[in-house]
Amino acid sequence: MARLTTLPAVCAAIPALVAVGFCGAICVAAMFGWTPTFWRGGPLTLAEAAALRDQAEVARLIEAGADPNAEYPLRPDVLSVNRATPLEAAVAARRPEIVSLLRLEGATLDGPGWHRLHCLAVEIGEVDVINAVDTYRPATGGPGSCTP
Amino acid sequence: MTIATYPRLLVAICAALIAGSLGYGLLQVPLQVNDSLPKIVDAEHSPGIWASFTSEIGTTDFRPLWVAEIKVLFDVSRGHVHLAYKAFHIALLLAAFGLFVAALRIETGVDLAASLFALCVLAGSNTFTGLVKEATPVNVYLPIVVFVLLAIRLSRSRHTWGVDAAAVLTLIAACLTLESGVLVWVALVAGRIAGRRGVSDRALVCATVVMAVYLVVRLTMLPLDTQNASGYLTERLEPEQIRARFGAGLSRFNVYTVLASISSVLFSEPRDGLFVALRAWEAGDVPPRMWINIVSSVITTVLIGLTACRLRSVTVAAEPHRDDMRADFFVFGALLAASAVASFAYAKDVVMSTAGVCYALVAFWAVRDHLIRVRRVGAAAAMAAVLLVASSLWAVRVVGMHHALRTQAFAFHNDWALMRYNLPQDPAGHRLVSALRDDALSRPVINPWFIPRWADRVFDIDF
């Protein structure tokens, strides 16, 4: 009888033990001060954080001294370009909330810069993004035409 | 050392690892902004613990002990606010897992297998998710789960005056924490009806008086605001929509939420009253996580149902713990029904968390029962296949709980970004929120870009 129960008992226990093993790996990593792989990401540049909706990382990087108007490298697959300013990255990734946050954190645009970004937002066609970019519109700058 | 020592020790270690890993996840999740921060600021402004306790009198929530806990933790934190609240949450989790393991009868290898299965049911359940994810800044449902498990423990123990006093005090503490605290009374009474003698009739009368006084005060002397947003079939309705469609009094909506709440424990659907799998089906894409939830729950509920059906005919010779098993099934049924009735106004999975924990307890009995009743090779093979599928799916759900935490960490982390521009005007509040924001932003969280796309389809997240 005991032998008959062994197989189903093992079948009930093994997957549960795998889950416990996963939990144990997290505990062991934490005890040694490591970040468990499951919780590990990677450092982001300011432009990547902007493209990837990482508001907290955008704020943290800028408050740690990163220039919100500089150009930064981007990993492949984040956007179709490999370098961009945080604002360009936020507009290309359709993140109006990041565009607004960058303004609060000190990002600026001159007339030509705003026009170029405005046209990029128009090309993307999302009203929220266009409105967010237009808050950067210089007092003296006109809308201009976005047609090439 | 008895023969039961090693299997029980092993289960306790497994429970500690699950609770510990969830605790690690909790520490990674920044404090929440929208619901937690105002309460932390209130705790800072409060002149003392008693003032915090009494501040709840006259409010619609009426959770004085919970608010006092928030104040106590703030005071003892000495600036380490994140750590204090998270440590308390982890302590509650450990207590819940500890009491759960204590409720299991673990003596043999079969018990060990059934216990491991039950641990996965406990930690992977959709009703358990809210016990881990919700923290405003202290989880308000988890203490109730701990109190109910304690009540079950007390009713099982040998009767003494101390047990009686502890039972009544547990009920009082639970009722002052949350309205669901009355479930402690349900657990005590159900345990007594089922034949448990740990808590005496005199103590039960005393507990009944306490509960009656609480209900009278709560329902007649304090303001009530029972209507929250809730799911209804495949749509989510706001309170105004519910009133407009079903009227202000009791209606078929209330019947729906009661039945939906029961179903959410037994079948993982609907979620907060919303049939998410049906909605996904209509949209043409049911992600694997929904199948995982439903299939694992259906198999487990069928096993529990089959065991429940033969409870009457079980003899002590065949099952030495028959009375315990019957009592746990009865307590589970009582708590499931009471929790569902308490959810009459709106369906929310976490409100059913106490029933969810007892569901895991009866899952232990059911798996154990099916294992010890295997008589033929064919039946053993079939049972092995069924348990392998169910246990595997529950294991995925346990891992999914960690995924839910890391997803939540990213969302909560982002909420702090704009806080710099919404700081309180008073100097003390300004200093506190600035410090909390700096602390939250300094915590590394994983951006979802680094997480494989399949994870959101396999692991259960917000629906």
Image (tube, grey):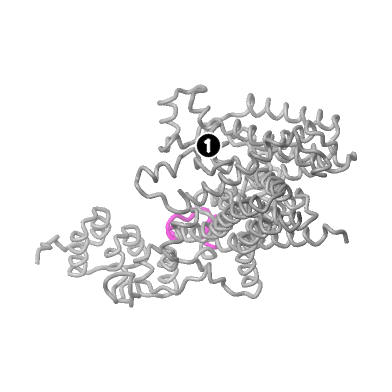
x, y percentage for residue B182?
69, 34
- Which residue is at 47% across, 36% downward? B230
- Which residue is at 78% across, 31% downward? B193
Above or below, comparing residue B96 to residue B236 in the picture: below
Mark 1 neighbour density, 10 Å: few (under 14) some (14–19) many (20 or more): many
x, y percentage for residue B364?
69, 48
For residue B210, side relative to residue A78 (left or right): right
Kind of residue at disc 1: Ala
Observer able to see residue B222: yes
Q: Nearer the viewer, residue A130 or B314?
A: B314
SS class, disc 1: loop
Q: Nearer the viewer, residue A99 or A80?
A: A80
The magenta stretch is: B417-435
Which residue is the extreme one toward the right? B160
Observer able to see residue B79: no
For residue B215, side relative to residue A72 (left or right): right
Q: Is residue B213 magenta?
A: no
Q: In which quadrant of the rendered view does residue A91 lie?
A: bottom left
Q: Nearer the viewer, residue B44 or A75?
A: A75
Q: Nearer the viewer, residue B20 or B162?
A: B20
x, y percentage for residue A136?
25, 62
- Which residue is at 58% across, 49% downward? B125
- Which secondary structure dominates the residues rendered in magenta? helix
- Which residue is at 71% across, 56% downward? A4
Image quarter of the N terminus of chain A: bottom right
x, y percentage for residue B412?
49, 57
Q: Is residue B428 magenta?
A: yes
For residue A139, side relative to residue B32 (left or right): left
The residue identified by callout 1 is B347
Q: Chain of mark 1?
A: B
Image quarter of the C terminus of chain A: bottom left
